[in-house]
Image (spheres, grey):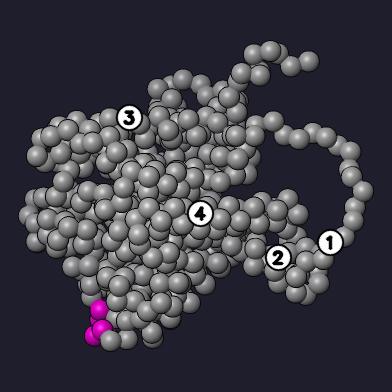
Amino acid sequence: MKNKNDRHKLTSFQVIILGFIAVILIGALLLMLPVSSREGRITSFSDALFTSTSAVCVTGLVVRDTASYWSAFGQAVLLILIQIGGLGVVSVASFAVMLSGKKISLSQRQTLQNAVSAPNVGGILRLLGFIFKGSLIVEAIGALLLLPVFIPALGPKGIWYSVFHSISAFCNAGFDLNGNVTGEYSSLTGYLGNMYLTVVIVLLIFLGGLGFLTWKDFIAHRLRFKEYRMQSKVIIITSFILVVIPFTVFFFLDFNNLPMGERLSAALFHAVTPRTAGFNMVDFSTMTHGGIAITMVLMLIGGSPGSTAGGMKTTTFAVIVGNTLSTIKRRDNANFFRRRIGDGIVKSASALLFLYVSLSVVGAIIISECEGVSMGDALFETISAIGTVGLSLGITPTLNIISRLVLIFLMFFGRVGGLTIIYAAFSKRDTYNSKFPMENITVG
């Protein structure tokens, strides 16, 4: 018989959600302080909450230009929020407890398992140590590689720019400090054609969005691809395809009017950044409708599970495609690398696709009606929010409170995870074991 106290005990999914909410609110309060703005004035709760949510959910949508509005203190707060959001609130809290020498209980380990999408509880603390060490090493190397870009132009201040952009890129956040250099909300447009910067940022984004368990497979097996777990194989192949195809399209269609150096830089950068980093090197108004559509699809897919990225995840996309192909071939199950995908996984992937698409559309309808903008522009913003991307067609800074609340919810949903929110809301699983009679229904 269950203890009465168990009824009031939070599930691991509820702990994850409450952790994110707590950090967002603390971040918002800190950003409201006069010391956080350059002009030394109190920032409205609406602006602070939106910015804090965007940072913790590693999205990058902003209502205030990061460089020109926020002070050094405010930028430092944003960077800490980005780091916490990228690695995960529960992961950061667990790592702090581990460093203090305190023991982490079994229930806490189970919460951590769900937070980092680990396959089992065993070895979860070793995985946590690996995640933090690996992240800090990659971010440090990224900052060092960015020094030659920012120091010649900015002097000693270039060190801070290098650290900020390295962490922002690795955490797939999309926040930048170029508002004082190349104009407000300019992102990395001033560096179009700089292949060195392009490659460094792209690698940081790619590594951050690949997933820490995939890292472990690579370190353990190097180039022996056959020895990787099936999930890692699916992630690598899917990620490769989602870079090569968009790169080809962008190179030959969207940026064919640019000089070759800028053309390569723009095509490579914009094949990677929509999943889900949020930096941009070109004005999206100059892209074709096809290019915009591909960007929206990439934003919706996002990165991989157990990574710093958001979105539906590459594995969700792969399962949906695999299930579609198996249906066309009249097979009972989707298969990857001689492994069968269970029906429960297919149902979860289908549910996620439905939730992400429907919430994006409903949110776009609300914003379109409230702001008087086209449905296409509004849909771009909502997909960017729920995919935790941060790319924008320029309408986010002008949105009213209702539209901002829509984007705040979508950013939170996209970062925490759709299934996490559902499982937290419906913590009691339906244990009714009897099955109803089956009857066929025609589809298609």
> How many neighbours does mark 1 have within 10 angstroms: few (below 14), some (14-19), or many (20 or more)?
few
> How many neighbours does mark 4 have within 10 angstroms: few (below 14), some (14-19), or many (20 or more)?
some
Residue 203 is labelled as: none
Q: Is residue 249 above or below residue 409?
A: below
Disc 4 or 3, which lies upstream in sequence?
3
Can residue 109 be spotted in the picture? Answer: no
Q: Is residue 240 above or below residue 355?
A: below
Callout in the foreground (2, 4)? 4
How far apart are the alpha carbons under marks 1 and 3? 50 Å
Name the amino acid, label 4.
Answer: Val
Callout in the foreground (1, 3)? 1
Residue 427 % position (x, y): 65, 31
Q: Which corner quadrant of the image does residue 35 belong to? A: top left
Check if residue 96 falls in the magenta segment. Answer: no
Name the amino acid, label 2.
Answer: Asn
Disc 4 or 1, which lies upstream in sequence?
4
Callout in the foreground (1, 2)? 1
Pointer 2: what residue?
323
How far apart are the alpha carbons under marks 4 and 3? 29 Å
Disc 2 or 4, which lies upstream in sequence?
2
Name the amino acid, label 3.
Answer: Ile
Pointer 3: what residue?
26
Is 264 placed left or right of 425 in the picture? left
Residues tagged 2 and 4 counted as in contact (Cβ below 8 A): no
Residues tagged 2 and 3 counted as in contact (Cβ below 8 A): no
Q: Is residue 73 above or below residue 347?
A: above
Residues tagged 1 and 2 counted as in contact (Cβ below 8 A): no
- Segment colored magenta: 258-262
Is 404 placed left or right of 430 in the picture? left
Pointer 4: what residue?
362
Disc 1 or 2, which lies upstream in sequence?
2
Can residue 185 be spotted in the picture? Answer: yes
